[in-house]
Amino acid sequence: MTVAGLPQNKAVKWTYLSARQISDELTQTQGKVSRYQVKRLLQFRGYKKRKLLKKNTLKEVEGRNEQFGKIAAYRQSFSQQGLPILSIDTKKKEMIGNFSRAGVAYATGQRCANDHDFLSSSAGQIVPHGIYDVGDNRGYLTLGLSKDTSAFVCDNLLACWQQHLQFKYPSAETILLLCDGGGSNASAHYIVKEDLSKLAKSLNMNILVAHYPPYCSKWNPIEHRLFSQISHTWSGVNFPSVEFVKDLTDRTSTKTGLQVVTSINRKEYFTKREVTPSFKENLTKYVTFDEERPKWNYFIKGRV
């Protein structure tokens, strides 16, 4: 039998052979052994089908554990005060059209999709940006039709606050924003901080930003509390139009009370925008950086 294992954990072993292949090999040396018997033997030995888990860290990041501790402290403080804790991120882009997608759906017959996934054959791309209200277990998904930029993210936050969140947190003066450190939320980009500063002024709110360290995006609450559930809703379904995706996503819910509100953002956004020179030169006038982990934590004052 072809068996592999982990040198650092002798209790973990696996085989690449199927029950049929194991049955065939045993039959050649031990006499006829059925697949049913093989499955019982595997179960007796502690073998069962398991998927690979993404748990091995590619790189040790200095200050990783300290940052997790800081985020936990922020969350506890905001939760105790009844202040908004918003986890944000952008989900994988999706093509509009009759394209195959992972997953299955109930059907009375065979469903067919295009045999190639070419963007040129699509009616465009959807950029799904999510905002997850950690304290209220409510998700807000914006379906963009342009680029995933910091301006796109801030416009979504502004609309979400004005249409929904301001009524839930009428006395709040500060928002805790949890996000990854790359893409439209890049912790090292000045343009992200400038757009967040404009957002803070538009909202007349302060924003405390806390980035998850590199290689730690899966710990961002939105990933396992919102995006995972939306993926279930989207499983095995193709997207004929952005309106269809909106209606489909609005049905997402869980027994623990998750509800999702979906909207469409048709505005056009542009990449490679330059930061305003005066903002960069006077950065500390707009942004106060954390003394211990300044690259991941900073406070943006927007409240007059």
Image (cartoon, grey):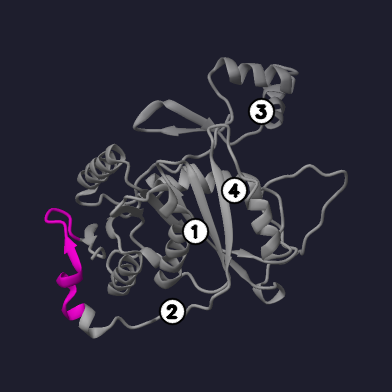
4 or 3: tag closer to the N-terminus: 3
Q: Is residue 293 part of the magenta span, yes or no?
A: yes
Please identify the quadrant where the C terminus is shown: bottom left
Q: Percent position (x, y) of residue 120?
A: 68, 77
Q: CA distance from mark 2 to mark 1?
A: 27 Å
3 or 1: tag closer to the N-terminus: 3
Q: CA distance from mark 4 to mark 3?
A: 35 Å
Judging depth in this view, the residue of 63 and 304 nearest the camera is: 304
Q: Which residue is mark 2?
A: 271
Q: Amino acid at mark 1?
A: Gln
Q: Amino acid at mark 2?
A: Thr
Kindly indicate the quadrant of the structure image that contains residue 127: bottom right
Q: Label 4 crowding class (10 Å Cα cut-off): few <14, some 14-19, many 20+?
A: some
Q: Secondary structure at mark 2?
A: loop
Q: Label 3 crowding class (10 Å Cα cut-off): few <14, some 14-19, many 20+?
A: some
Residues tagged 3 and 1 counted as in contact (Cβ below 8 A): no
Q: CA distance from mark 2 to mark 3?
A: 54 Å
Q: Which residue is mark 4?
A: 231
